[in-house]
Image (spheres, rainbow, N blue to C red):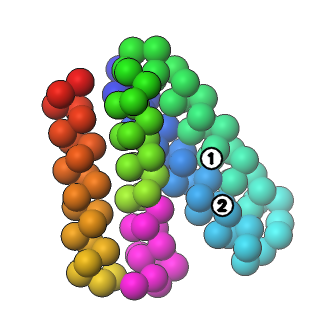
C-alpha cells in the first residue's frame, strides 16, 4: 500500500508542477488551486508512504517520478522538445527508480 501512496504522491507532484506552468500563463484561482492542491496532496502522501518505505528510497522515487512526469507533461501537453537524449535520460531515471524498488 505504501508504494501505491508513493506513486500517487509522485502524480501529485506532477500536478503541482503543471500548476506552476499554468500559473505562469494565467493567474487565476484554478491555477493556484492546481499548484497548491497538487503539492499538498503530494507531500501528504509522501509523508504517509515514508512510514513504511525508507526515506532515501521514497524520496529518490518521488523526485524521479516528479522529474519524469513533469518532463513528459512538458513534452506532450506544452510542446517541449522530444529530443532522443531527453528520452534516454528519462529511461535512466525510470531504471534507477525500478532498481531502488527491487532492492528496497
Query: Would you say residue 102 sits in the magenta stretch?
Result: no
Q: Residue at x 64, y 69 (%)?
A: 21
Query: Would you say residue 78 sits in the magenta stretch?
Result: yes
Which quadrant would the N terminus be assigned to in this image? top left
Where residue 30 sits, quadrant-wise, is: bottom right
Residue extending farthest front = 56
Q: Could you say where residue 101 lies in the image, as x and y percent from the top left?
A: 23, 32
Q: Could you say where residue 80 lies in the image, as x and y percent from the top left?
A: 45, 82
Precedes in sequence: disc 2 or disc 1: 2
Which quadrant would the C terminus be assigned to in this image? top left
Say left or right for 52 vs 99.
right
Residue of label 1: 38
Circle number at residue 65: none
Residue of label 2: 19
Asked if the residue at tag 1 contacts the one at tag 2, i.e. Cβ–Cβ closer than 8 Å, the answer is yes
Label 2 Cα neighbours within 10 Å, binned few <14 / some 14-19 / many ≥20: many
Q: Nearer the viewer, residue 78 or 103?
A: 103
Q: Residue at x 18, y 39 (%)?
A: 99
Magenta-drawn segment: 70-81
Regarding residue 4, the answer to whether it shows in the image is: no
Regarding residue 3, the answer to whether it shows in the image is: yes
Q: Secondary structure at mark 1?
A: helix
Residue extending farthest right = 28
Q: Residue at x 22, y 61 (%)?
A: 91
Label 1 Cα neighbours within 10 Å, binned few <14 / some 14-19 / many ≥20: many
Q: Secondary structure at mark 2?
A: helix
Say left or right for 88 vs 64.
left
Q: Is residue 44 above or below residue 67?
A: above
Q: Is residue 69 above or below residue 6?
A: below
Say left or right for 19 vs 47.
right
Amino acid at each position: 500500500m505504501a508504494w501505491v501512496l508513493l506513486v500517487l504522491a509522485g502524480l501529485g507532484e506532477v500536478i503541482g508542477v503543471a500548476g506552476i506552468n499554468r500559473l505562469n500563463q494565467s493567474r487565476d484561482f484554478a491555477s493556484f488551486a492546481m499548484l497548491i492542491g497538487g503539492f499538498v496532496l503530494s507531500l501528504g502522501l509522501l509523508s504517509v508512504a515514508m512510514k513504511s518505505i525508507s526515506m532515501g528510497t521514497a524520496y529518490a522515487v518521488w523526485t524521479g517520478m516528479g522529474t519524469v512526469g513533469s518532463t513528459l507533461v512538458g513534452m506532450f501537453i506544452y510542446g517541449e522538445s522530444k529530443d532522443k537524449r531527453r528520452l534516454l535520460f528519462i529511461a535512466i531515471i525510470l531504471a534507477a527508480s525500478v532498481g531502488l524498488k527491487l532492492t528496497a
